[in-house]
Structure formats: structure tokens, C-alpha cells
């Protein structure tokens, strides 16, 4: 909490630069956060003890819950926008989990400090996700199934916390920061002003989807900016372990990407989705030319399927099955170990391979069939973990959706809102197509928990609700 308080100073500086009057809320929040953090740290400053796996799970969950709660303080103190307690928490957790669902209407007239803070929260959340997925969860035994590559550097093969995790986290920070700077520079060259370029680079690399304008990327009306966004979304949707391996100290080796099965499947999914959207839209004659149709099809297909949620067009108004197709594509999401949400491509690959193996076993009951990815045979423990994750994911989805419907939400809105928050996508259909301002407080709290479940790979949060976890 003490360290997090430092993130409240840059928005205050932005308020001073732009003289928008939004800085006082951040100064007040900074002081409160610092005092709370210090009061918790000081009595325990001399306490030293090795962490066990059980405390690791609790720490990871508390990390997101506490920082998400503290992140809501500036929204509570701020006069513009004037948000309720529920709305403040919803906006903060949506930013930190990189969901991108918003309750704020009228972004164009908000103080620059608030706009910058929303994007900064997403950027910090995106970095937290990378460290969580690549360094922490494999050590806890959760999420390790996507890091199956024996040749990968980093802490993948470690069974306990070691300095290699700190080294890996530092290297991931450098990669993440370099991508953010490159993205901001590209946006600026394409015509964004400095403020918009920085903010949108934060939310692009974090695959968050927040924008400084109500019209999102459609505000800029630029095919070049759209293409830049697509390229960096795809880069951020790749496993950061791949970036780590491709740009290691031994030199640049781009062949690492093309040897990776998950990379090839991810790109194939994007190509198929874009082709389906293009053919359907072009046949419907909505747009004037093939070039304009392709621009919209490519951008929305990549934005929704990678769980970013940026918009150049109201995709929910597209014809036929396209809106539902794109919502379903967000269930796949990006690669494991990326800032994207969803089930993750690697798990979908393993589910398909397991399904194929079961079909072969029906034909050859005594046959021995192994599941291989990139030439590596995977143990059954990994497949069992993936099936367990898929079952838990489906259960959480159904429960959240039914609770929303029990509170009076219509079926389409409940389905898409649950999918959008559990997959950390953001925009949905029906009442939540543009924003979440019109839904009730109870529904927002349900969706807030859905965001956490999706961001913490379900098991990490679900395990806290089991009696086994709390037994000594």
C-alpha cells in the first residue's frame, strides 16, 4: 500500500500541468494510502518468515483486492466524475484487472488527471498480470500448464521462490516498458497528441481497452492508428516468456515465435475471425468500400478476441451472428503468460488435443496415445489441470450469469456482461454495450467478483473458498 501510494503522484502532476483542478483528490488519497501502509508495516517491520504455498495464494489474492480497493479512493474523493462507492470500486477493479468496463459517461470532458489515472491503473495491472502468470503462479502450482516449454528461461522449472524469479520479473518489466514506449511513439507519429498517445499505449500494452474518449479509437478516425493498435495488441497477447526468450542476452532469435504452437494457433484464430467478419460485413454492404470494411473487421476482430475491448464501431449493431461470435472469441483470449484475458489459447489447444485423444481411444481401446505440443509429450497431470480449470471457469460463469438474471437483468445482457467481465473484455451487448452505468449496484458487485475470478485464473481465488485451505 505504501509503494502503491507513489502511483497517485503522477496524476496529481498531470493535474498541475493541465490546470484541470483534479489534483487534490490524488494528494488526499496519497496521504491516506501512505498512512495506512505505514501503520500496517511498522508494527511488523522486524517479522521474517519463509512463505509457504498456502500463504502465497492468500498474498496473491490480497494483492489484487487491497490495491483494487485503495485504487478506488481517488474516485471517491474526486468531484468530477461524481461516483458512488460502488461505482468507484467497480471502476478501480475494472482498471486494475485490465477489464476495461466503465461506469463513467462523458470521458471527453473529464479532468486529465482522472483520465491518466485510469490508464495508469490498467498499465500497472497489466504488469502485475505478467509477473503473476510467468513468475508466481507456476511456483504456486497454478497456471504452470501454459509454461510447458522445457527450453524456456526463467523460473518455470523452479519448485520454490528463488532469485531467478526476481531476475525474470525485472526482465519482464524491461520488455513491458519497451513495448509501452514503442507503442506511445507510434501513436504520436500517427497523429495522436502526447497525452492521448501515452494513455492509449498504457491501455494497449495492458490489453485494457480504456480510452480518453467516449468514442474510443473511433474518435481518431484513422486507419493508421487502428493498424498500430492491432499490431501492438497482438504483440501484447503473446506469451511474454516468448518475448523473454526471443530477446535474451544471447541475442535476438525470432525463430522462437515460429516454433511455438500457441503463437501459430493464435495468429490462425485472428486470421479466421477477421476473414469471417470481413466477408459478412462486405456482403451486407454496410460500409462504402472493401478497404473500409477490412479496417473495421480487422480492428474489431483483434480487439475483442484479445479481450482489449477498444472500439472503432458499435460492433453490437453488426448484422447476423457477428456480435455473438466476437463475444465467444473472447473466451479463448490471448496466449498464456500475456496481458490478455480469457481461457487462453494454450488451454484451448490442450482441450482439443484431449478430445481428439478420446476419439482415438474409442476406436483403439488398448492404444497408447500421448499429447504433444512442439514435440514435447505432456504428462496427464497437466491435462487434468486444464480440464479442472475449464470446469471451474464454466461453473463460475454460470453462477454469475444466473445471479445477474435473478436480479432482473435480461438474458442477453447477463450473458454478455458475465462473459465480458470474466474474460476481462469490457464491452458487452444489450444494456452494457457502451458502459455499465445503467445497471444496479448489486449487479456491479457480482461483475466485480467475475473480473477477479477471470484475472486470478479462477483457481487462485476459488481455493480460498475451500475448507481444505483453512485447515492446519
Image (cartoon, rainbow, N blue to C red):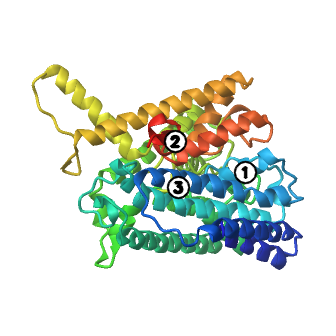
Q: Could you say whether the residue bearing mark 2 is in a helix, strand or loop? A: helix
Mark 3 or mark 2, earlier in chain? 3
Q: Position of residue 120 (x, y in %)?
A: 66, 65
Real-space CA distance between mark 3 and mark 2, rounded to the nearest whole angstrom: 11 Å
- Would residue 208 be seen by someone viewing this image from the given angle? no
Which mark is in front, 3 or 1?
3
Q: Foreground mark, 1 or 2?
A: 2
Instruction: Please rate how many residues cluster around mark 3, counting C-alpha atoms within 10 Å: few if below 14, some from 14 to 19, many from 20.
Output: few
Q: Name the outermost residue toward the left.
A: 366
Q: Is residue 98 left or right of residue 444?
A: left
- Identify residue for label 1: 91
Q: State the SS at label 3.
A: helix
Locate the N terminus and report the quarter of the image it occupies.
Answer: bottom right
Labelled disc at residue 222: none
User: Quarter of the image holding residue 327?
Assistant: top right
Cβ atoms at labels 3 and 2 below 8 Å apart? no
Query: Can you say which quadrant of the picture contains the C terminus?
Result: top left
In the image, 397 versus 374, the foreground residue is 397
Q: Is residue 12 left or right of residue 429?
A: right
- Kindly identify which residue carries mark 3: 59
Image vertical order of residue 138 relative to residue 228, above or below: above
Question: How many residues crowd around disc 1 within 10 Å: few (fewer than 14), some, or many (20 or more)?
Answer: many
Q: Secondary structure at mark 1?
A: helix
In the image, 326: left or right of 23? left
Mark 3 or 1, nearer chain start = 3
| Residue 292 against residue 319 in the figure, above or below | below
Residue 217, x across and y down, in percent:
67, 56
Which residue bears the numbered disc 2?
464
38 horizontally vs 387: left or right: right
> Residue 262 at x, y = what percent?
34, 50
Does the CB distance between marks 3 and 1 fall below 8 Å? no
| Pick the front one: 324 or 221 | 324
Amino acid at each position: 500500500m505504501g509503494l502503491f501510494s507513489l502511483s497517485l503522484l503522477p496524476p496529481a502532476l498531470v493535474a498541475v500541468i493541465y490546470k484541470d483542478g483534479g489534483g487534490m483528490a490524488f494528494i488526499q488519497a496519497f496521504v491516506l494510502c501512505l498512512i495506512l501502509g505505514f501503520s500496517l508495516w511498522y508494527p511488523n517491520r522486524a517479522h521474517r518468515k519463509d512463505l509457504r504455498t498456502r500463504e502465497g495464494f492468500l498474498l496473491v489474492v490480497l494483492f489484487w483486492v487491497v490495491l483494487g480497493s485503495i485504487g478506488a479512493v481517488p474516485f471517491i474523493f474526486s468531484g468530477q466524475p461524481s461516483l458512488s462507492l460502488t461505482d468507484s470500486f467497480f471502476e478501480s477493479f475494472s482498471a486494475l484487472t485490465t477489464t476495461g468496463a466503465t461506469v463513467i459517461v462523458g470521458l471527453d470532458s473529464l479532468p486529465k488527471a482522472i483520465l491518466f489515472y485510469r490508464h495508469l491503473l490498467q498499465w500497472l495491472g497489466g504488469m502485475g498480470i505478467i509477473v503473476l502468470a510467468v513468475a508466481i503462479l507456476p511456483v504456486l502450482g497454478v497456471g504452470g500448464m501454459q509454461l510447458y516449454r522445457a527450453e524456456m528461461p526463467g523460473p518455470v522449472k523452479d519448485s520454490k521462490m528463488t532469485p531467478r524469479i526476481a531476475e525474470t520479473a525485472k526482465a519482464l518489466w524491461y520488455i513491458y516498458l519497451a513495448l509501452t514506449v514503442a507503442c506511445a511513439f507510434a501513436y504520436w507519429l500517427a497523429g495522436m497528441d502526447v497525452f492521448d498517445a501515452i494513455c492509449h499505449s498504457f491501455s494497449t500494452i495492458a490489453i485494457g481497452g480504456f480510452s480518453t474518449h467516449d468514442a474510443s479509437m473511433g474518435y481518431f478516425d484513422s486507419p493508421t492508428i487502428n493498424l498500430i493498435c492491432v499490431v501492438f495488441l497482438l504483440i501484447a497477447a503473446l506469451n511474454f516468456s516468448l518475448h523473454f526468450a526471443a530477446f535474451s542476452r544471447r541475442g535476438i532469435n525470432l525463430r522462437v515465435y515460429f516454433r511455438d504452437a500457441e503463437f501459430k494457433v493464435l495468429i490462425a484464430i485472428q486470421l479466421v475471425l477477421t476473414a469471417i467478419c470481413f466477408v459478412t460485413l462486405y456482403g451486407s454492404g454496410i460500409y462504402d468500400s472493401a478497404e473500409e470494411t477490412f479496417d473495421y473487421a480487422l480492428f474489431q476482430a483483434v480487439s475483442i478476441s484479445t479481450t482489449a475491448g477498444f472500439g472503432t464501431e458499435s460492433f453490437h449493431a453488426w448484422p447476423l451472428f457477428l456480435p455473438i461470435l466476437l463475444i465467444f472469441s473472447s473466451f479463448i483470449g490471448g496466449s498464456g503468460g500475456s496481458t490478455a484475458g480469457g481461457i487462453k489459447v494454450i488451454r484451448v489447444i490442450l482441450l482439443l488435443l484431449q478430445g481428439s485423444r478420446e476419439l482415438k481411444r474409442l476406436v483403439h481401446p488398448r492404444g497408447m496415445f500421448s499429447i504433444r505440443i512442439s514435440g514435447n509429450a505432456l504428462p496427464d497431470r497437466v491435462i487434468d489441470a486444464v480440464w479442472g480449470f475449464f470446469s471451474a471457469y464454466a461453473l463460475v460463469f454460470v453462477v454469475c450469469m444466473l445471479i445477474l438474471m435473478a436480479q432482473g437483468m435480461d438474458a442477453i445482457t447477463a450473458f454478455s456482461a458475465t462473459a465480458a467481465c470474466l474474460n476481462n473484455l469490457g464491452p458487452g451487448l444489450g444494456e452494457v454495450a457502451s458502459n455499465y452505468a445503467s445497471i444496479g449496484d448489486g449487479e456491479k458487485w457480482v461483475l466485480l467478483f467475475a473480473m477477479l475470478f477471470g484475472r486470478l485464473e479462477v483457481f487462485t481465488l476459488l481455493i480460498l473458498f475451500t475448507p481444505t485451505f483453512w485447515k492446519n
